[in-house]
Structures are given as structure tokens and as C-alpha cells.
Image (cartoon, coloured by chain):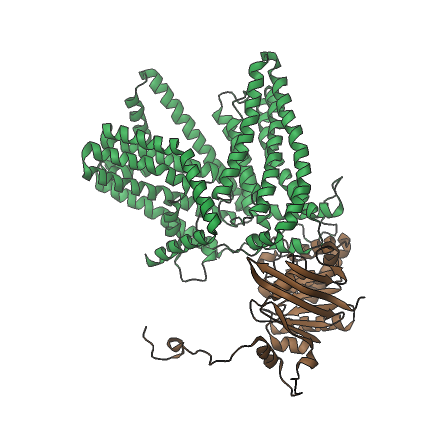
Chain colours: A green, B brown
Amino acid sequence: MRTVRLLLWLRWRTLVNALGPRGRVVTLVGTAFLLLALAPVYLGGAMVAVAVAKRGGHDVLVPLFGIVQFAIGWFTLLSGALGRTFELDRLQRYPLRPATVFLTNTLTAASEPVVLLSLPALIGGVVGVGLHEGAAAGALAGVAAVLLLFVTLAWLQWLLALLDDLLRREWLRYVAAVLFTGTVIGAQLLVRRGMSVLRERTAAAGYAPDDVGGLLRDLFGALPSVAAPASVAGAVHDGPLASPWIGLAVTAALIVAPVMLGTRAMATSARRPTATTPSGQGRARSLSLPIPGLTRIQGLLLGRELIYLLRTPTLVFQWVSLPLAALALWRLQASDPTSLRGPWLPLTMLAAGLVGRNLVMWGHDGAGLRMLFLEPLAARDLVLSKNLAWLLTTLAEGAVVFGGVWAIEGSRATPLLVTVVPGYLAVVLVAAVGGTAISILHPIRPRERGLGRRGPGGLTSVFALLGLVVVLGAIVLMVLGVRMLLPDHWDVLGSTLVTTGALLVALPVWWVSLERFATLLEARREAMVDAIAKATEV
Amino acid sequence: MSEFAIRTHNLSRTFNGRPAVDGLTLEVPSGSFFGFLGPNGAGKSTTINILTGLLAPTSGTAEVLGMDVTRDGLAIKRRIGVVPDGLHLFERLSGLEHLRFVGEVHGLSGAEAKRRGEQLLEAMSLTADAHKLVAGYSHGMRKKLALSCALIHEPRLLFLDEPFEGVDAVATRELRDLLLRLVAGGRVTVFLTSHVLEVVERLCTHVGIIAAGRLAACGTLDELRHRADGAPRTLEDLFLDTVGVERGEAGAGLDWLTGGDAPR
């Protein structure tokens, strides 16, 4: 426990020391702002939980625990919202047991926003049970809630450790990408099936809140990871888990198993060498990509960018998983994928992915960044090559998603794609502008290991994402407005004109911004080298 | 070729109001092997960063190969080679790819960059690891690769920040001989920082000592190795006298470590 405490202290100090006095104030203000903005979500959840638990007692715990576990898992898998605090191979020089590091990661995962946002609902449920059945029952419900969090976080940490181990192997990183994508798609299927069952049964029985609660209890009661912690509070009435002692034993097993598996995966991956032999050795031709319109140096920089990005496992992983998951989301979530509602969620998902990556446009160079600045390279060439490499990869992602929809739906999807694709390109260009600016002004060295979908984190990421969602939302609102104003048969043309207009505005803005960012880059080189090339990740 | 490869006048750089380099005036003759010494935090790396265009000076002027560092940054970078402190290489390129990239950035054709890259790797005994990613290189191998990168475009001036740190004795000898050959040819000036005074004594023709951001001593090695009264002294004596270190007993106060009876 002493080592765990030390590691928790280390985490706290590295977090605090990373911010100057001004940074701390900005972080506090930003956090307060976010807390206010998200209050309807977590306070609403808490109030509903108190009200329902006060009326239903501990029976409410199974659906409540199920919703919380599902929310944490779903957000984690969909957005990469959960990370690993410590990577074992960074701590190998110290006499630390892998299990200690794994346990610390599990504990610190409880401080991640996605977990913190679910806490008020859990606390509300515990308070509600206490009000209904007395303090002792409330305390027991509290213990069960803590156990639930532990089970959830331990399993997610095991998944992260497993993925990390797979990502370190040359070919298995693609398997990992498919595994991850499969998990996301599986989660979508589960939600869709659960929702349709819920809809059918509530429609058949007539809507009643208690019926919905009962259905959710049946649904989540079948999940041991939910039912076992809930049974500790006496919330399960059927089957072996009706006994709280069996519930406690199963909960303990559900914590020990991922800790053991995760520790083993972590220890194995920490010993796994990451350096591999690249393919295509010794070609005599130039590294420069002969692209019309680019100078030899610009082509050379673009070639290096692409080689470098393709050898960054986390990015490869993201490129495989993100478009496939977005495509699946498009197909599975929308009742009619060719309607205008179809692409909203997948496009938001793609936009979230754009923000995660554009903020670390320079970060993946790591120590090599200083080498780039030491070479005789014009700042504009550097900015241009970074942007082109980033645009090429995002366009490839878009091609998979839009091409996939077109391949599945055929010509039915053409009117939608004609509208959506220019809008997406406009958003991509805006993300390029914003990302270039932020990645120069707030340089961040991304995590080299772990789940590639996790962005650099922090308030910068949150505000950048909000900014992009605002742009995306503005384009969508304009499209909807035009469709409302025009007769139905003009809808496609009107929408397409709006999105194409947005693209035509975004394109020159992006082009002009390159020059400005080149000047900015010149002024910010030292800070970037300090933050990216010299920074070491614990 | 101008008389001085490097000239600075009243060069200063402050960080948060604290001077790292404070009014440095320095002249490094062309074709010399210049050793730039100083204790940790004296301003050596900051000076190199300014001279190599990574850092803008707060005040003062600096010329490298006759060009102004703030105005002619790109032109200077085309003519110099740098082995920076901490190395900072592209981890996800192979050794040969790295050399080819740097060579092509400096205007060599793809074929020529590959040819020179292979020759440099052979000279550095890295041929067997040419296709391995830099991430898998040992510290010594990285040093050799960084030096190769600094040499591939035939620079006129080499900046070497601690080039022998972490390099084995055989490689040190090879690198040393190579550097001496370069300087002996008369076309290359070497600006070297090192904490190993023996290396500096063996290689350098000129020495500058910086302390607290200011130049404390500068001249040829022979000039500096004699006190004002003509008595000879070692480079270590010169260094310690110049930076003003009082010598105390090593390990004083560490009884618990050196076998004393301090309580645990």
C-alpha cells in the first residue's frame, strides 16, 4: 500500500507541477465552467437516482449500477475516455511490482472525468436507499457502489493493458484494432437490441416507469459485473447471487481476475521490444514524394511525415478503428442510414477523433522535433507538410466511411453524400486550422503507449472539441434551415449549396493560415522543443 | 573564408528574467578545434542553441560563418552540422532512412544521400544496424548516428554538445581521429562542449570557459595553460580556478553512506 500511495503522490505532483500558477487558475476556471455546463447531466442523474431509490429502495441498485457501468464502459470504448496513468516500462528501473502499478492505474482511473460524472448518480442512489431503508442499508449500498466502480475500472484497465500488449506487436496491432472496433460495434449492437426489446415490451404492456425499471433490472441482472456488487447490498433476489456472501465472493473474483490478467499483460508488454525492422529497406530512390505542386523539400517532408505516422502504432490503430466504428455506428444507429439523421453521430465521432489528433500534430515527432528545427527547413514548409499529412490521413478516414456507406447503400446514398461530404471537408479544414494553432501554442507530447484514441486530454482538448462541434453544429443548422425554407424537391440542392459554401470559405482560410502559422512556429520553437522534445513521460 | 567561424558581441539570453547567457563576447577562429567549457547550468547549451538557430537572443549579436543568426538562420543551418545535447533523433526512422532524410534536406540527391549514408554508417560501424529503427539504438549508436547526420552534407562548422558522453572507448578513439582529420584538413571548424577535460586537452586548439553566463577565460590552449607568472597548470586547474570552485572533502556529511555511525 505504501508504494501505491507513493505512486498516487507521484501522479498528483506531476499533475500539479505541469501547471504554472496561471495554468492552475485557468484550469480551475475551466473546470468550474465545465462543471456548470455539465450540471444537468450529473445533477439530473443524481436527483433521479435519489427520487427513484427513495421510493424503490435497494431494488433500484441493479438498474442504476447497470446504467453507470454501461455509461463508463460505453464512453470509454467509444471515445477512448479512459487512459492509463502509468506505463510499466517507464517505471522499470524502480523496484515496483507490475501488480502495484496496475492497481494504481485502476485507482487513479476513478479520477477520470467519465467516472467522476457518474459518481453523483451513484451517490444519489446510495442516499435514496438510506432514506428508504435506514443508514445501515445506505452504508451497504455505498460499499456495493464502490465495489461496482472497482469491478468496472479493473476490467477496463485489463482491456487497455491487453490492447497495449497487442499494439506492440507488429501485426497484432491490426488485430487489436479489429478487436477494439469489434468491441465498439458489439456495444452498439447490445444497445440497439436492448432498446428494441425495451420498446417492444413497453409498447405491448403500455408505458409505466416501474415496468421500465423491471426490464432494466432483468437486463442488467443477467450481467455478473453488475449483479454481483449489487447483491452485496441485498439487491438481487433470485439465483445464487441472492446471497450477499456469494455476491461478495463473485465480486472479489471479478476484481482479482482482471487484476491478475491485466498485471500479466502489462508485465509482458513492458518486456516486449518495440523497435522493429521497417519494410522496404535500402531503396535507392528519394524519400521525397513526387506530388505535383510541391517542391522537392515539401515532398520530402511529407514523405517523412507519412513514414513516421505509419510507424506510430497508436495512430495506425486509430486509423483502422475509428472509421470502421463510425461506419458501423452510421449503419446500426440510424433507422434509415440515407436520411439526414444518419451521419450526425458518426460525424461527431469522426470530429472527436480529429480533435484528438490535430492537437498533437507536432507531438508525435517527440525528440525528433528538435532535429526538424535544426535542419535548414523553412517554417512554412514544415507547417504545410504537417497539414498535408494530417489532411491525407483524415481524408482517408472519410473515404472509408463515406465510401463504405456508398458501397452498402448504393445510389440511394448519393444525395446524402453529395451534401455531407463537402460539409465534412469543411470541418476537416477548420480542424486543421484550429489544430495547427493549438498544437503550436500549447504543444503536447502525446502518450506513446496505450489506447491511441485517447487525446492529449485536459481543458485544451475539451474546448477544442467544443469549438469543432460548434462549427459542425452551425453547418448542420444551416442545412436544416435551408431545408425548412425551401420546397422539398429543392432540399438536396439547397443543402449541398450550404455545405459547399462552407467548404469554399474554409479552403482559403486554411491556405492563408499556413503563412500565419509559419510565423507563429518561428516564435514558438523554443517552447515546443521544451514541451515535446525534452519532456519525458512518467 | 572569414577569419572567425563564430563571433558574438554582448550576447544575452534571459529566461523569466534570469540570465542564462549574460553579455557573452566570443571569437572562434576558422579552422580551430574550439572547446567550450563550463560547469552545469553555465550557459553552454543556451549559447549553442542560439548559435544553431534554435533560440533567439534577448540582446546582442551573433555571427556564424559571417552570417547573422537572427537574419540568416536558414543559410547558416545549410552550412553547419549539429550533434545536440540529448541527441533528439527521429525514433521511428531507421538509421539509414534518417541519414537519407537529412542528406536530402540538405539538397543531396536520393542516390547520393544513400551512398553517403551507407559510407558514414560503415565508418561508424553501424552497417549491421542500418535498417533498424533508431528507437532500438543504444546511446553510443545514437551518438554515432547523430554525428553522421551532422557530417553528411560536408558542413563548414560542427557544433558538438558532449559528443563522447556514453560512447565506448573504441568508438571514442574512432570519433576523435575522425574529428582531428576533419580539422586538420582546414575546411572545418569544430565547436565542442565536454565535461571530460582530458578529451578537451587532447583535441582542442582553443578553449573558452563560461561561468554564470559570462566568458571567464578564452584563448589558445597553450596560452591558458600558463599562469600569469608563467607557471604551468593543467586544464583541470585552469577550469577550477576560473569557475571559482572551493575544494572540499568529497563525501563530507555523508557518514551514513561512507560507513559512519549516523543513525538510520
At x 73%, y 62%, the residue is B63
Quarter holding residue B263: bottom left
Q: Is residue B209 above or below residue B112?
A: below
Quarter holding residue B54: bottom right
In the picture, measured across the screen, residue A162 lies left or right of residue A377, that is: left
In this rendering, does residue A281 appear at all? yes
Quarter holding residue A414: top right
In this rendering, does residue A63 appear at all? no
Q: Choose between A56 and A405: the one closer to the eye.
A: A56
Q: List the single residue furthest toward the right.
A: B1
Q: Is residue A68 above or below residue A369?
A: above
Residue B197 pos. (x, y %):
61, 76
Residue B112 pos. (x, y %):
77, 56
At x 62%, y 14%, the residue is A490
In the picture, measured across the screen, residue A315 lies left or right of residue B48, that is: left
In the picture, measured across the screen, residue A126 lies left or right of residue B230, that is: left
Residue A514 pos. (x, y %):
67, 41
